Image (cartoon, coloured by chain):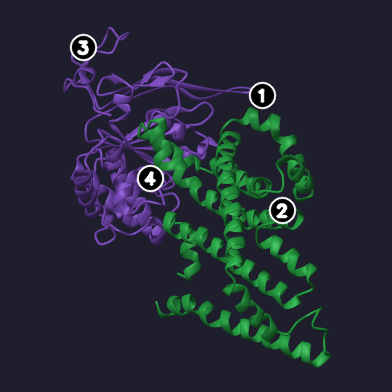
Chain colours: A purple, B green
């Protein structure tokens, strides 16, 4: 699976507006241009996403919130190359993710995805799970295991490298999943309610950990959640999606510098943002 | 840890005790009701006869034939069962079109076909191998089919998001995920294969432990009959043990393996 350097920088056909050097620093990390997704069923067409436009910058942490059914997961899956948009473009550092109904594998290779379930492989140990993406790319055993051990330490699993998923708690499994997504040093980390299945206390701790990990890896993160406090606590910006059809209702900036401590949640401004978003979400139903 | 350890040791203590209790009860029963030797011999007589049977080299020739028939049939069933299971699990239209046939062929009492096999393939080893294979085939195929379909959607998605190719997805996900089902099918399959072989030997031929059972029955030698049955059970147990060990080696991560140790 060696990546050819030429294909990495070759201009993508069919987009005349792009500069000849798509990886130029001027290209934002992630650009969504008019993303629309329709699902066709027997009862007709459902428009899950309607004309989503959004630009995300390097090292930015963006939270996507909305009621269930607002299309936030669909949007994230479109970014991950798992759901084909009906219209629009996903540009990662100026390069188009979708080529018709297929994904450009060299662009997908720059993504790290964490799902709601850890989805670990029970037949592999913690390090082998973390190193799996590297293994698929043909990275040598010694090298990938070294990297996996580093990442295990980064996500706070030092001492559990040889453990198997069944021996870990839910929070620890999700840490493994995060480390696995980070193993390829993705340009963009996509997280779909990664802590949704965890209890409140574990979740809080994972949020603090995630900030540390994001800072340490200088990752750009898109984080889907239905928890307003979590979204505000983590995000530089919060994108509020509204359902039927899924559209961006508002984008809120959160000015507190990252990484944030748990005490930020008692700041009046933090409370104000949470309150505003909650009202906006409550109006929807 | 001590709990897990004692749980592991438990069967090694209880099994001999239960066996002893069983044979004592048997002996007491025979003595108390003065059961005819021809109907139910005393355990002592059976063990004596077992000693003779084991010392007789002809017995081992018969045993070798039985083991050969069973393993050949089982291995054939394994190969065909895995291939058929994968195809049926992966290609829905084939499964749909063949399902009525498969259900029908499962319902057919396959043991009833043995006389037919004897006519077709003779009294030799072939008819028994085919019988063993036919009986072992279905549990293996059905388990593999189920296993192929039971690959978790979330894990598939991980492989997709990692840009994994077909072969990579097969090696790292599908194969390993299906393995427990293959082994579960094998566990049932080996038992069925032994049944197929023995019944085959009962009904036709001149070799194998099943044949030996028929001969001793005709000689009305009840103790030896029991002795041969015990020998058959031990051989069956050994074969099952081989499959079970395979499971411990191949899928140590699976709950059917680590759960057994009471962890």
Label 2 element class: loop
State the residue at coordinates (31%, 49%). Answer: A128
Q: Split into 4 quadrants, where in the image is the C terminus of chain A?
A: top right
Q: Nearer the viewer, mark 4 or mark 3?
A: 3
Of tags 3 and 2, which is closer to the observer?
2
**Residue designated by label 1:** A43
Tell which tag, 2 or 4, sits nearer the viewer.
Answer: 2
Give A206 or B185, whichever is nearer the viewer. B185
Q: Which mark is residue B205?
A: 2
Q: Chain of mark 4?
A: A
Q: Is disc 4 on the same chain as disc 2?
A: no
The residue wearing badge 4 is: A274
Give how far apart the Cα atoms at labels 4 and 3 are: 40 Å
Q: Are marks 3 and 2 on the same chain?
A: no
Are both tags, 1 and 4, on one chain?
Answer: yes
Q: Answer whether labels 3 and 2 touch (C-beta < 8 Å).
A: no
- Residue B9 location, x and y as percent? 47, 78
């Amino acid at each position: 699976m060696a990546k050819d350097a030429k294909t990495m920088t070759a201009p993508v056909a069919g987009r005349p507006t792009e500069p000849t050097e798509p990886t130029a620093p001027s290209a934002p990390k992630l650009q969504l241009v008019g993303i629309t997704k329709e699902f066709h069923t027997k009862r007709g067409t459902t428009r899950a996403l309607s004309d989503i436009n959004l630009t995300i910058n390097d090292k930015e942490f963006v939270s996507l919130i909305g009621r269930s059914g607002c299309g936030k997961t669909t949007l994230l899956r479109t970014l991950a190359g798992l759901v084909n948009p009906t219209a629009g473009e996903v540009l990662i550092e100026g390069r188009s993710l979708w080529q018709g109904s297929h994904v450009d594998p060299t662009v997908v290779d720059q993504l790290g995805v964490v799902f709601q379930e850890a989805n670990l492989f029970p037949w592999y140990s913690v390090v082998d799970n973390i190193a799996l993406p590297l293994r698929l790319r043909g990275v040598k055993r010694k090298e990938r295991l070294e990297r996996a051990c580093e990442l295990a330490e980064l996500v706070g699993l030092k001492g559990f490298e040889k453990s198997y998923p069944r021996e870990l708690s839910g929070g620890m499994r999700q840490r493994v999943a995060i480390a696995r997504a980070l193993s390829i040093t993705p340009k963009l980390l996509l997280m779909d309610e990664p802590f949704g299945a965890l209890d409140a206390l574990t979740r809080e701790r994972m949020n603090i950990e995630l900030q540390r990990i994001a800072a340490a890896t200088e990752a750009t993160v898109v984080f889907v959640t239905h928890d307003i406090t979590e979204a505000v606590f983590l995000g530089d910006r919060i994108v509020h999606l509204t359902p039927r059809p899924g559209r961006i209702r508002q984008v809120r900036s959160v000015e507190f510098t990252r990484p944030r401590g748990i005490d930020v949640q008692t700041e009046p401004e933090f409370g104000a943002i949470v309150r505003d978003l909650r009202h906006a979400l409550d109006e929807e139903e | 840890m001590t709990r897990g350890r004692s749980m592991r040791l438990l069967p090694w203590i209880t099994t001999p005790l239960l066996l002893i209790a069983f044979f004592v009860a048997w002996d007491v029963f025979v003595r108390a009701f003065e059961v005819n030797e021809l109907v139910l011999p005393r355990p002592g007589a059976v063990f004596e006869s077992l000693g003779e049977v084991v010392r007789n080299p002809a017995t081992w020739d018969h045993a070798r034939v039985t083991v050969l028939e069973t393993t050949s049939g089982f291995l054939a069933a394994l190969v065909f069962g895995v291939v058929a299971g994968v195809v049926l699990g992966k290609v829905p239209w084939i499964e749909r079109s063949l399902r009525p046939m498969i259900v029908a062929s499962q319902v057919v009492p396959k043991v009833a076909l043995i006389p037919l096999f004897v006519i077709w393939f003779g009294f030799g080893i072939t008819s028994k191998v085919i019988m063993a294979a036919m009986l072992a085939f279905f549990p293996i195929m059905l388990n593999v089919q189920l296993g192929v379909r039971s690959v978790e959607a979330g894990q598939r998605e991980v492989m997709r998001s990692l840009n994994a190719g077909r072969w990579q997805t097969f090696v790292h996900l599908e194969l390993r995920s299906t393995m427990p089902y293959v082994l579960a099918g094998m566990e049932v399959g080996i038992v069925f294969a032994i049944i197929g072989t023995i019944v085959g030997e009962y009904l036709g031929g001149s070799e194998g432990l099943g044949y030996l059972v028929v001969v001793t029955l005709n000689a009305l030698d009840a103790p030896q009959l029991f002795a041969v049955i015990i020998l058959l059970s031990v051989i069956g147990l050994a074969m099952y043990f081989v499959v079970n060990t395979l499971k411990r080696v191949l899928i140590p991560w699976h709950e059917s393996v680590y759960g057994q140790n009471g962890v």
